[in-house]
Image: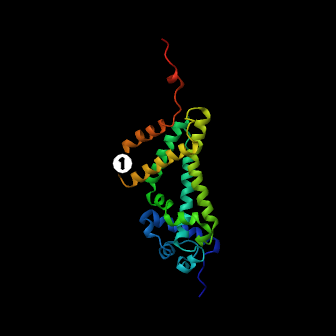
């Protein structure tokens, strides 16, 4: 009997990540175990029966590292989508970013919750103690998270530079204010606590608070 075909060493990890992503999308975090992922690897040119829990462990230290691969992909996707916001003014772009962030969470609820998974975040904070087989993965996640926030920071920078946003507050704090609001709105949406029709007004009010005052408002009227 000829030997069963085996996954090439370099091709199994992407297949495992793809399988984990699919399980997460339909069943949430609890549905993703190494055994379930190994069993879910799609059949292709290789024999799926050769994919075992032991084979998976040759590529990742455990389910947290496997899910970190999935998380990295989705952080990169979010950063790309936010970077595509191209409203003509900084304030309009900030509003668009907040709404796009919320829409992303609504469209991919299980993936969005994974992106804030506590175990993965702890690993990013202490990468030397995470025990990942691919520690550079944690740098990839941190970079993508920073890029996602960078969309808010760049919008604020542009608004401060062109004089449309206020200059008496730190740009970082202003960017964090809208980013935090966006995250709060996203979590409210996932928990179905906030009606959709209220979102635009809430975002508009927050962005309005960051606008630079109109110089005309400070000109005393002639008597």
Q: Position of residue 173 (x, y in %)?
A: 54, 45
Residue 144 shows in the view: yes
- For the point 64% across and 65% down, the residue is 136
- In this rendering, the answer to whether 77 lies above or below 217 is below
Q: Position of residue 212 (x, y in %)?
A: 53, 32
Mark 1 is surrounded, within 10 Å at the Cα level, by few (under 14), some (14 to 19) or many (20 or more) other residues, namely some
Callout count: 1
Q: Quadrant of residue 169?
A: top right
Q: Please tell me which residue lies in front, 120 or 220.
A: 220
- In this rendering, the answer to whether 83 lies above or below 54 is above
Q: Please tell me which residue lies in front, 124 or 151.
A: 124
Q: Position of residue 153 (x, y in %)?
A: 58, 45
Q: Please tell me which residue lies in front, 81 or 134.
A: 134
Looking at the image, which residue sits at the far top? 223
Colouring chosen for the image of the structure: rainbow
Residue tagged 1: 194
- For the point 45% across and 62% down, the residue is 25
Q: Quadrant of residue 62?
A: bottom right
Looking at the image, which residue sits at the far bottom? 1
74 vs 194, left or right, is right
16 vs 28, left or right, is right
- For the point 46% across and 40% down, the residue is 206
Q: Secondary structure at mark 1?
A: loop
Quadrant location of the N terminus? bottom right
- For the point 46% across and 67% down, the residue is 23
Residue 52 shows in the view: no
- In this rendering, the answer to whether 65 lies above or below 102 is below
């Amino acid at each position: 009997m000829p030997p069963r075909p085996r996954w090439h060493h370099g091709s199994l990890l992407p297949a495992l990540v793809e399988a984990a992503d699919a399980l997460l999308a339909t069943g949430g975090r609890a549905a993703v175990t190494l055994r379930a992922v190994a069993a879910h690897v799609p059949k292709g040119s290789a024999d799926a029966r050769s994919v075992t829990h032991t084979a998976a462990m040759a590529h990742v230290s455990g389910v947290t590292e496997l899910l970190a691969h999935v998380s990295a992909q989705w952080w990169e996707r979010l950063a790309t989508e936010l970077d595509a916001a191209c409203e003509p003014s900084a304030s309009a772009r900030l509003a668009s970013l907040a709404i796009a962030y919320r829409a992303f969470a609504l469209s991919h609820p299980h993936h969005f919750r994974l992106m804030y998974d506590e175990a993965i975040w702890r690993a990013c904070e202490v990468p030397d103690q995470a025990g990942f087989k691919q520690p550079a993965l944690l740098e990839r996640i941190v970079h993508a998270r920073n890029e996602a926030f960078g969309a808010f920071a760049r919008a604020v920078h542009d608004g401060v530079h062109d004089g449309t946003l206020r200059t008496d507050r730190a740009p970082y704090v202003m960017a964090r204010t809208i980013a935090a609001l966006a995250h709060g709105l996203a979590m409210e949406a996932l928990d179905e606590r906030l009606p959709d029709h209220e979102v635009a007004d809430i975002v508009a009010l927050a962005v309005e608070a960051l606008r630079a005052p109109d110089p005309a408002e400070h000109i005393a009227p002639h008597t």
